[in-house]
Image (cartoon, rainbow, N blue to C red):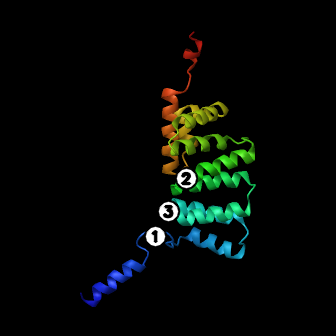
Amino acid sequence: MNKFFIILILSLLFSGCSKGPFQTISTPKIDKLTELIKHHPNEAWHYKERAYCYAILGLKQQAIKDVNIALKLAPENAPLHSQMGWALFNAGAFKLALKTWEKAAELSDFQNLYDYYALAIGHWANGDDLEAMKFYDETAKKDSDFGEWLTLEEKTKHWTRKEKEAIYRIYEMWRKSYRLKPYLQKLS
């Protein structure tokens, strides 16, 4: 094998072409967040933002690491727990996402609408469709926009593809097999 091919193979191996457990990716947003973290290492929100970036880029281990740091820095912050659940969900860590969303809902005493639809997604992602539809039904009762396709689509227009796929699948199951329509309620 000549030198060119050896150099090429070695450069490919060490250039981060695969998404290894701690591959470094540089984007302007990640770079800025990393800089902010260096200057403010106790600011949970910077770790939260970077965790979400890592999750969207498919860097599960980095996302989980930043989630853990953020939650250690602000263990009683319900919105932070909820947002960390979204990062974990997008990273594919579904069991951790559900646990994090359960903690967020507990901390907020189920006062936020997003507690309900996040738990619906968490249960769905972990294979519990019935529990997912129960939480989705509560979501739709609290906000009728979740009960109709067009308003659901509008509400979720800024969600990631993975988030939309989850909520749309839950909506379809709920609409076709769980929701009681007014005409059914009148029948006896």
Q: Mark 1 points at which residue?
A: 20
Disc 1 packing (10 Å; few <14; some 14–19; many ≥20)? few
Report if residue 178 is visible in the image.
Answer: yes
Q: Name the residue under label 2.
A: 89
Q: Which residue is the site of mark 3?
A: 57
What residue do we see at 67% from left, 53% from top? Answer: 81
Residue at 61 percent of width and 53 percent of height? 85
Q: Which amino acid does label 1 sit on?
A: Gly
What amino acid is labelled 3 in the image? Leu
Question: Which residue is depicted at the point 55% across and 31% down?
Answer: 148
Q: Do the residues labelled 2 and 1 touch (CB within 8 Å)?
A: no
From the viewer's perspective, is residue 162 above or below residue 58?
Answer: above
Query: Which residue is found at the position 55% from the left and 49% from the top?
Result: 159
- In this rendered view, identify the residue nearer to me: 69 or 152: 69
**Which numbered tag is attached to residue 93?**
none
Looking at the image, residue 169 sits to the left or right of residue 50; the answer is: left
**Disc 1 on helix, strand or loop?**
loop
**Label 2 neighbour load within 10 Å: few <14, some 14-19, many 20+:** many
